[in-house]
Amino acid sequence: MVLRFIGIDPETGGGNCPAVWLDDARKELVLQGWRADDEMMTETQRDSPLPDNEAVIRLPYRMIDIIRKAIDDAEAIDHPQLR
């Protein structure tokens, strides 16, 4: 597996923070974020039950441009006609 690093939280203070990668082979976004607390977990599960193999994470708004770049890069590979 080769992950393509897209970006890290621009306000990181030591590298231990949310980050975004692309897995082009699996055609997936890979997100590292803060774990959701119990209150947030309860709220999200009202709309979507959480199976054991999934997680809810939080990412700050300041990462929108990084997430957008990951989506744009993935679309360029998966749907080159959209470019």
Image (tube, rainbow, N blue to C red):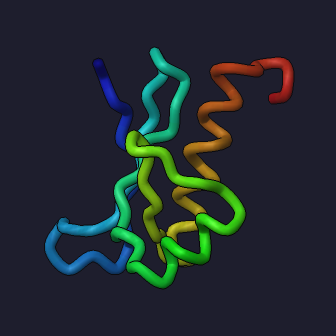
Q: Position of residue 28 (x, y in %)?
A: 52, 31
Residue farthest to the right, as pictured: 82
Q: Position of residue 44 (x, y in %)?
A: 60, 68
Left or right side of 79 for 66: left
For the point 59% across and 49% down, which residue is it?
A: 69
Q: Position of residue 11 (x, y in %)?
A: 34, 80
* Image position of 4 with respect to 68: above or below: above
Q: Position of residue 26 (x, y in %)?
A: 48, 19
Q: Nearer the viewer, residue 27 or 41?
A: 41
For the point 70% across and 31% down, which residue is it?
A: 75
Left or right side of 15 for 29: right
For the point 46% across and 70% down, which residue is it?
A: 58
* Image position of 14 with respect to 55: above or below: below
Residue farthest to the left, as pictured: 14
Left or right side of 20 for 46: right
Question: Does residue 6 show up?
Answer: no
Left or right side of 82 for 15: left
Question: Does residue 73 show up?
Answer: yes
Q: Quadrant of the N terminus?
A: top left
Q: Quadrant of the C terminus?
A: top right
